[in-house]
Structures are given as structure tokens and as C-alpha cells.
Amino acid sequence: MTILQELVEYARNCIDDVRISEDEDYISCKKHKWACKRFLRDVARAKKKNCVFTWNEQEAQKIVTWFSHLNHSKGVLAGEPINLTKWEKFIVCQLYGWRMKYTGLKRFHHVFSEVGRKNAKSQIMAGVMLYEISAASTANEEIYEAYTAGTKRDQSKIVFNEAKLMLRNSPLQKKFRSTNSEIRHIKTGSTLKTLSKDDKKTGDGTNPAALCIDELHQHPTMEFVDLFLGANTKDPTLFIITTAGYNLNYPAYSVEYKYCSQVLNPGTDIENDDYLIDICELDPEDYSDPEKLGNERLWYKANPIRMSYEDGRKKIRDAYRIAKEVPEKMSSFMTKMMNIWLQAAENGYMDMAKWKACEVKELPISTKGMPVYVGFDMSAKIDLTSVAFVIPFESEERDEQGRRIVKYIVFTHSFIPSREKMIERKHTDHFDYDMCERLGYLSVTDSPIVDQSYVMRYVLETCKENSWEIQCLCFDPANASKLMMDLSDQGFDVEEVYQSHKSLNESTQGFREQVYCRNILYTYNPLLNFAMANAVIRRNNGLIKIDKDASIRRIDPVDAVLCAYKLAMYHEFGSSKLDEIDKFLEMEI
């Protein structure tokens, strides 16, 4: 059986939750199944002539052979050669097996792997880093600088020290020279070193061909990740390995985990052919009931290696028993062993599969002459500003009482002051704003700050072009007080939408309910989809609203939509717009 055939079989077994034995159970979480489906799609894509990447069986086999020349450094297998498990092959063989068709270089230059602790993350990365400074360096005829980075000196040394131990008594040992500060490949002169803030080694001025960020959940910033932006080698690779953590404001969760989840999710438009991703965790339904958490078979989802042998299972079993007896230890068990971001369990606003089901290629009706409610999320001048157009209409569908069902058509458009700001946001958000501009979903105002008059011209011209009748202009007044006064003086109906739980709960809940009932229609808009996937909620006494503080990446189009929907949901067909506004104001009092 070839490596490719083995991985195809593995992916199918994971998707089907196949159980062979206690030592070989393929039950998988939703995101690992997404990763498997992505791999199978790639296999199908690679068969097409126009595909830019191809599978190289020889390269995939090379990395497997490489690991077999290294030794386990600890545990029941200490001193024995490393035979990669199928899950480990799923990561490293994809990394080295997928190649660009016309250059032969690696397809993937970014790797994100998140799994429960003690599942050989450090061993995998140590073996890969040694391979990079030797085999890859030789193949590309370059002298590689490779680094392992951690927040603390000890953390940065974990992968480095593991690499030294794996070489001990290995047939590869004589090809390297190891000291306390570096591992050097003798033939090429390529080196592996550590970086940490403790040692004041932040990597400034380096040119990393391979960079491993260990336990990203401990990093308060993306400082070390940003080093990779300066990589100027033929085939550089950034490796991020981590287990879940506790701080949801750190970039491991707020940026990388969320982004990688969206790339894997087939219900989003976000794709990244440069990023190899795997996430092994318990699904929310696995721990919503505390008693269900004791189902040992579920533990395989977050522990593909540790649950594959009896000693590993026993250690997790013992930790769970202690966590049940000492409740204070349960959070640590769930986070470190089951790889659960605890605070993130129920914060997501939208089921993206249901949101995507509302997307249509063409609108079923003409919107010419229809009423429109316009929502604004005005930025603090130098960031993203968004407007939303919500058009209510009576569909031909009828409810149980025979009344026509009201549906809502949604359009959004966003603005950013400059291309410099767009490049900055592209880097921090991991999103292609350039593409949105090219497709017409984003405008660059070419001004020091977002020009509010530019935004209003766009709104008025769009409404005029479509003969939409503006019913109300709906604002969060935080950054728009002067504009609201000017528009009111010009005769427009302008309403403040207060940003409290009480004010926003009905529209936030109601819009989501309309999505789930397929009563929202929108045409393809990648920026709106991106924002919807980013949105999380904040709860207060049973009320919800979108949490602007919890999301580092953009949610502005969603805020604008909910602002407009807040008024549009009161629309009465056949009545005057003044009557509708009066009804809204009565509800607010």
C-alpha cells in the first residue's frame, strides 16, 4: 500500500468513526473530519490537469524513512526507532507529499496542529526541524536558519532538546553537531537554535527557513509568528503547535484557531491552499453533559496517540478520576487533555452552514422601487466602516395561518481609508481584503481617515441606482453624531440604535432565527461571510448582543446588518414609514 492509499483509507475511517480495536479507534471530532474531507478533496483536485499541485509519493516516503532513523526519547518506547502512526503521517506526509507541480517545492508553507498534550507534538516537530536543516537544506542548496520559539526559555528548549535526544544513538547522529545553543548539520552548515524573550532573543534580523512556534496559546502577541514574514528562502515553513489554553484574547484562539477552523469548515468561503491544518478536540456535545465526559471512547478525538496504548489510556483515566474528585482540576483536564477552549464553548453567534444556505446566486425578485433600511457601523475614523441595506418583502410562501411570510434581502459594503491600512488588516485578520476590493465589496477612500461623506454618497447613489425608497438611516451614534444631525437636517429619518443588551437582543436573536428559517437572502459576499463567521455573542441576564470586544478580527458588516434589521423587522407593508418609526419608538420606551 502506498502512503497516499494509506492516508485515503485513514481519512475515510476517521470520517466514518471506524473502530478496529481499543488500540486502533478512528473516532474523530468535527474539525478533524473536516481536515480529512479537505484531504480527500485535494486528492480529487490533484487528478485534474489544471491543478497547480500534485502528490509526490517519493517525498512522502522520505519523511517516513527519516523518522525511522530517529529514536523515541522517553516513555515505554524509549530508545526504539520511531515508526510514525497514521495520524502523524496524516500531518507530515501531507506536508512533504503535496508539491507544486511546476517548481517541486512544498505546497504548504504554514502548518497548524492543535491536539491534547502528550500526543507527540514536540517529537513530530523535532524530527521535522532536523529534516529541514539537513535534507531540505541540501535539496535546495541553501544554508538554513531554523528556530524554535517559546515565551519562556524552557518552553523554547522543548523541541530543541527533543531533537537532541532523538539523535542519541541514532544512525543520523554523526551528521549533526550539538551544543547547548545550537544543533548544526555538518554538511550544509544549517542550524537549529532557540528564541525566547527570557534570553532577549526575539529573532530580529534573522532569516528563518523553518520556524516552530511551540504552545502558541501562551503567546500574548504574534511577535514570533511575524518573524516568518521576513523569510527569504526558496521553501520556508512556519510550524505552529499548541494545545488549547485559557486566554481567549491571546492570538492562539482569537486569530489562529478561529481562522484555521474557518479554513477547514466547508460551510465558509475561506480557503488557503498554503495552510496545512489539523485540530483534534472534543466536540461541544461531548462535554455539555458532565456525565458524557466520562465516555472514554470520546477521548480518542483529542488524543490520537495517547489513547492508542494502554499506559496512555491509564494516565488520562487517572487524571479524569482526580478531576471528578477535585472539581478545581476539571478545567485543566478539559483544556489540556481534551483540548477544549472552555470559554469558547457557546460564544459563536451563527451556524455557518445555515447562514450559507441563505446565499442565492440570483435574487428571486426585482428590488427596484422597494423600501430599504440602511444600517451603519462607523469606525473610529481609521479602520473598517460598513453599511448594510436590508429590504423586507412579502414572499409567496405562507405560514400556518395563511399569511404571506416576510423575508429580508441583505446587501453590505465596507470602506477602509487607505491601502496601507488594508495591508495591515490583511496581515492581522488573515483575510484577503484585496480580493474584496477587486470584486466590489470594499472601497478604499484614499483619505487619512474614513471619509463619512464618501460613505453617504455611496449609500445615496446606490439607493438612487436601484430606486430604493429609504425608510430609515440607522446608526450606532458612537462615531456618527455630527453625520446624524446633518442627515436629519436634510430631511432623512435618522434613528439611533443603542448598543445595550436590551436594545440589541431582539434584533440579534431575531435575525438569527430568520436565518435558521431561511427567511434571509443574500448574494455572495466574502467580506460579509467572513464577518459572520467571526461574530461572537455576549450574554447578560438572558439577553444577547454581538460582542465587539471579544473579536479581534472584523465583524463590522454584521453590526451594520443588525442595526438595519432592528428597524426593518418593524416594517408594515402598506403603512407609511412614519408609522413604522413611531411603532419602533414605542417599543423602545
Image (spheres, grey):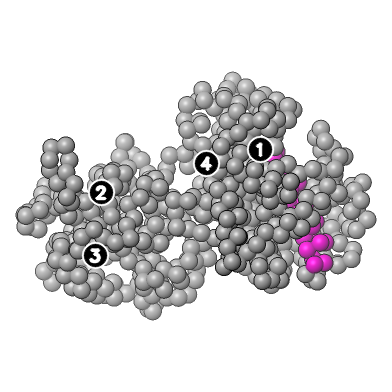
Instruction: Find disc 1 in the rendering and name its residue.
Output: 304
The amino acid marked with disc number 3 is Ser
The amino acid marked with disc number 2 is Asn
Residue 124: within the magenta?
yes
Instruction: Find disc 3 in the rendering and name its residue.
Output: 481
Distance between mark 2 and mark 1 Cα atoms? 41 Å
Assign a secondary structure to mark 2. Answer: loop
Instruction: Find disc 2 in the rendering and name its residue.
Output: 519
Instruction: Find disc 4 in the rendering and name its residue.
Output: 30
Distance between mark 2 and mark 3 Cα atoms? 33 Å
The amino acid marked with disc number 4 is Lys
Contact between labelled residues 3 and 2, with CB atoms less than 8 Å apart: no
Contact between labelled residues 3 and 1, with CB atoms less than 8 Å apart: no
The quarter holding residue 538 reads top left
Distance between mark 1 and mark 3 Cα atoms? 55 Å
Assign a secondary structure to mark 3. Answer: helix
Sequence order check, earlier mark of 2 and 1? 1
Relative vertical location of residue 359 with respect to residue 381 in this rendering, above or below? above
- Please name the residue shown 23% across and 71% down the image: 462
The amino acid marked with disc number 1 is Pro
Sequence order check, earlier mark of 2 and 4? 4
- Please name the residue shown 75% across and 58% down the image: 59
Sequence order check, earlier mark of 2 and 3? 3
Task: State whether residue 459 appears in this view.
Answer: yes
The answer to whether residue 67 is left or right of residue 265 is right
Give the residues in magenta: 117-139
